[in-house]
Amino acid sequence: MISTGLDDAPSLTADEEQEVAHQYEERADHLELDAFATNTALTDDSEDWIKSLTGPGAKLLVGPRGCGKTHLMRYAFTQCVADPELPLAVYINLNRYYTLEPLLRRRPDAMSTFYVWVLANIVVGFYESVEAFKATSQGLALDVDSLQEFDPAEVRDLIGAYEKSQSPDAGLETVATRLTIDRVKQLLIRSADVLKRRRVVLLLDDAALTLTPEYLSHFFDIYRALKAPRIAPKASVYPGTTEYGPNFHAGHEADTVFVWKRVTDGNYLAFMQDIGAKRFPDMAQIPEDIRAMLAYSAFGVPRAFMTLVRSYLKNLKRQSTAQSTFNVTIDEFLADRVREYMTLKDKKPQLATIVEVGKRLFNSMVESVTDANQALIDGDSRQLYIGIDASGVTDKPYVTRMLLLLEEAGMVYSGPAVSHGDRDYKRYVPHLAALQAKRAFARKGGFSPKFSVEMLSRPDEKHPVRRSMSTLLDTPTLEGLSLDLPNCLNCRAKRVEGAKYCFTCGERLTDESTYDRLMLTALAGVPGLTDWQRDKLSNWQAVPKTVGEFIALQDPGTTLRTIRGVGKVRAKTIIDAVQSFLDEYLS
Amino acid sequence: MSIPSASFLDTITPFSAPTKGKLDTENWFDPNHVTAIQSPVDEFRSNLAQINVLYLRADARGEYTSMLGSLVYLGMVSAAEGYFRSLLRRLILVDEACRHNASSRTLTYGAALHHAEDLLPEALLEGVSLANTKNVATELKTLCNISQMSKDGNVPAALERLFNNFESICQVRHCGIHRFGKLGSQQALRLGMDKHKPLLEKPLALTVLQLQEIAEALEALIRAVNSYCFADILKRTHSAGPTGKEKTKLYQDTWQLDWTQDQKRFNEYYDIFASVGGSQPSDPAANVYAAFMTFVTAYNAKK
């Protein structure tokens, strides 16, 4: 049931829209640092997570997009600034790594550039962070001269040159040669001494480097080398990542901290509701049961919860009943999740078939779990887990990969494996939004959020729904799983999996650059644009036609404003759309 | 008829007499081969491709053996060494500064007497092995003034990783040539005794994947060095030219900053360095020239 008050609410004024937009700002990297202390919900879990960031020891922060890794890091950062007992924290965001991806396909020495780029980012992040620490350490007599190891402006220029694929001039080249791990570590330790902090934590955000496993394994070499008794690196990555490189053994070199809230946890609902209440007070307008359902559908991802709440309130104005509002909200949200998952096909073209089949596997998993719950509808338990016979998974690299990709995209939550009889089962919870869309927790024909919430708060079934790969997918599909490799560019012969050279002509087999390919996307084809914007962008002479040309503009805002009817605000929405397109595809 | 017993003492290893009394080495080489219309990097590429096909096809037929692998390995390093030789020779013929550096080197009388003029520079390097980093860096420094290369084997920082791999490949090659692939203590020392000690006197046993990795490492090195030298030399033709700011003028010709006028001279360099075939060809000369002009403009604008 929904209150009539909400239904009658007048539409928002422009100012109110603005206000709401701010409240809803879901992406932590867009939030001002000041907003963190007040907007961040601290539950027991997140308190532990924050402690793992401010405490000693190398850590890997693991969770899918939007689960709040950036938020945690930035919150940990503000904590460190405020509390002199905590370490010197340095926040570094690596999300622009993708600009170096084309280099990998063109330059045999790309790794050296990447190495310098990472260290340069650490140095820039260091100087920015130190500013915040200096501001709060005014009582201390600081010997800031000893921190002048690098000129931050120069280092920024160096990063800029690399990201634009320009070769740095002689001056910047010298800066590049001075950027070594040892020098950076010494600078960090010296600064900790100056700022009277015992330790240093490096918060390396967006280190999943999805497009470039080559860089990722190299990144973890650097990560390992940065580790020191007084320096603790912390990196955020996606689940399902396996490409840490030959020298890095996750779990051995660093503790893995799973920051993706488990939907099966006893305090799940309290956790999500608490975050919601802190970050979006107006949520109270939504009836409690529906709120709970939305929280479950968010599947442990706070940003998704915000999106669902916003979308529910928006749909409320258009839909006649609570039921249709809820259904539309879930369907739209699920479609977005699936679409995001499917972007993996563009990001990793060689995995296109595996991603495609992964979607079918996911649907099968959802169906199995839905059926199980329908059978339990009058019982006293719920079934969230599906157990997949490990024998059809572990010895099949493509099947393993397929499940890891679903995990990476946050479509399934992987639980600890269990044994049953003489078989081992890998356990997964499929995305709850998909289960809700299938009405797994509803009686046929009725809509009762109250019942669904009641069912979702029942204890778990003792055993998962047990399936084997061959029952989830048909045999021809399973046998047809393979990589999608482009033919040899030189002789067009089909290539052999894993080969570096063509066995027909002996020439190098090459991979195209995903970044370069994405740059050719039509500007008007970027998702999130209105029809009007699309039309204007494709027909306006002065505006470039591809994303690549567009982001190369010195001042895209000015160019956009040459279009009749586009002012500051519209120009910004277009630029934002392009930026989120890039973020989504490349980060 | 029985063999006289004295022969047992003389002939511990019996073998039938060879049918060919004197080997005619003059027939072993291809007299019709026309040298170097290809750039050194393309020569390397096509040599490597031919070698790759050997073991990759053998593998596809199920006939690959590690013995074939060891032989192929020697061929690969030889292809890389050949690249450096060709590059140096071509540069001495075309580039004023390199020619100047080479002019003070001594040549054997025999080479001077018998070689065709355009092959003479190759004779300069006959006594030098180019299958190790130190010699490559030394020759690139002393003959070509390539920046950040030095006689003690230092290479530009960006190329260090690639040269380190090259050095390891060359160390193992020693075993291939002199010890039939068994790891010797000298090489183990250079490769790192900690990891190689248990492998002393063990034979090389390369897999097809490892051979491809070696091919990749060599091609990466060659292409990176090629790119580096091209940019370094081309920039120098301007900065150490008549209108440049370097004190030592290495060049007498001035770039006219106009494609039609500069084309001939530019192509001389482009032809030495560009790769025109394979799966990763160079950008067209005019585009590379345009990028060079961007450099010249920026260089001139600087004080």
Image (tube, coloured by chain):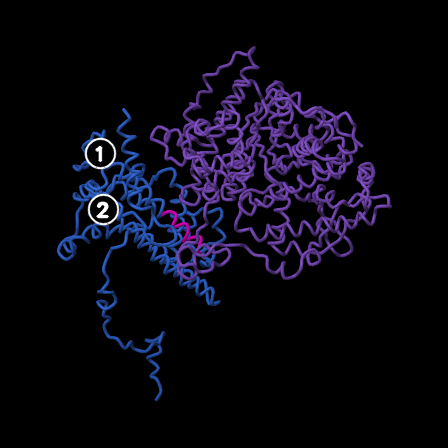
Chain colours: A purple, B blue
Position above or below: A236 against B3: above
Choose mark 1 or mark 2, whichever is in front: 2
Tell me, yes or no, whether the highlighted magenta stretch contains residue B220: yes
The residue at the far bottom in this view is B1
Give the main secondary structure of the magenta stretch: helix
- Give the camera-side residue of A363 and B54: A363
User: Dot 1: within a 10 Å radius of its alpha carbon, few (fewer than 14), some, or many (20 or more) residues?
Assistant: many
- Looking at the image, residue A101 sits to the left or right of residue A239; the answer is left
* Amino acid, disc 1: Ala
* Amino acid, disc 2: Glu
For disc 2, the chain is B
Stretch in magenta: B211-221
Q: Secondary structure at mark 1?
A: loop
The answer to whether the residues at label 1 and label 2 have Cβ atoms under 8 Å apart is: no
What mark, if any, has residue A335 been given in the picture? none
- Sequence-wise first label, 1 or 2: 1
Q: Position of residue A30 (x, y in %)?
A: 57, 27
Q: Position of residue A545 (x, y in %)?
A: 44, 38
Q: Secondary structure at mark 2?
A: helix
Q: Which residue is mark 2?
A: B268
Residue at the image position 33 percent from the left and 55 percent from the top: B79
Q: Which residue is mark 1?
A: B240
Mark 1–mark 2 Cα distance, whole angstroms, equals 18 Å
Q: Quadrant of residue B77?
A: bottom left
Tell me, yes or no, whether the highlighted magenta stretch contains residue B133: no
Q: Position of residue A255 (x, y in %)?
A: 63, 37
